[in-house]
Amino acid sequence: MASRNGSRYSLGPMEEVKKVFDKFDKNGDGKISCDELKDILHSLGSGTSSEEVKRIMSEVDQDGDGFINLQEFANFHLGGSSSDDSQSSKKELRDAFDLYDLDKDGLISANELHEVLKRLGEKCSMGDCSKMISAVDTDGDGHVNFEEFKKMMKLD
């Protein structure tokens, strides 16, 4: 079995962050607006309210300019946020996990990952999704649970 870093399907942490950032940055201006954040969350099936989107923006937007730039997004995504509020970080991670856990069973399957990536407009085969899941699946059950997801997001 190929290692995560040796796989041709994996990119470095910053390249992955940039790919995700570009999905959020619909108009390509190098920053994520409140509307872009809300649109992507809704396209993923999240019923996030406008107030919740504003709260997320205020947590991630470290310079307070009303937008999330690539560095702020990377800091949040890679767990290096300047506000080291672990309760808030855990909630944000749980919210991210829940976007992928479509059937709300506490596990992310290859099917769920495939469905979410399709909604994001990604061209990704079911086989690719299975490989992504198995790269993170440390207990070998064929799914990613929240603990595995946390480790992946922190790149431990």
Image (tube, rainbow, N blue to C red):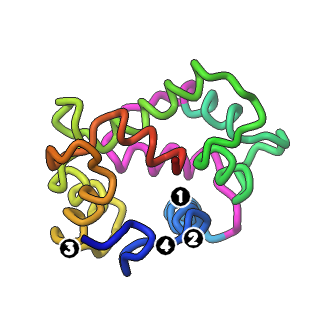
Residue 94 placement: quadrant:
top left
The amino acid at mark 3 is Ser
Q: Which residue is mark 3?
A: 125
* Residue at the (68%, 39%) spot, across then down: 60
Q: Is residue 78 above or below residue 60?
A: below
Sequence-first tag of 1 and 2: 2
Badge 3 local density, few (<14 within 10 Å), some, or many (20+)? few
Q: Nearer the viewer, residue 40 or 111?
A: 111
Residue 54 placement: quadrant:
top right
Which region is colored magenta? 29-52
User: Of circles 1 and 4, which is in front?
Assistant: 4
Sequence-first tag of 3 and 1: 1
Label 3: which secondary element: loop
Sequence-first tag of 3 and 2: 2
Q: Which residue is mark 4?
A: 11
Q: Is residue 134 above or below residue 62?
A: below
Sequence-first tag of 1 and 4: 4
* Residue at the (60%, 33%) spot, across then down: 56
Residue 116 vs residue 69: left or right? left
Q: Is residue 96 above or below residue 51?
A: below
User: Of circles 1 and 2, which is in front?
Assistant: 2
Q: Nearer the viewer, residue 135 or 18?
A: 135
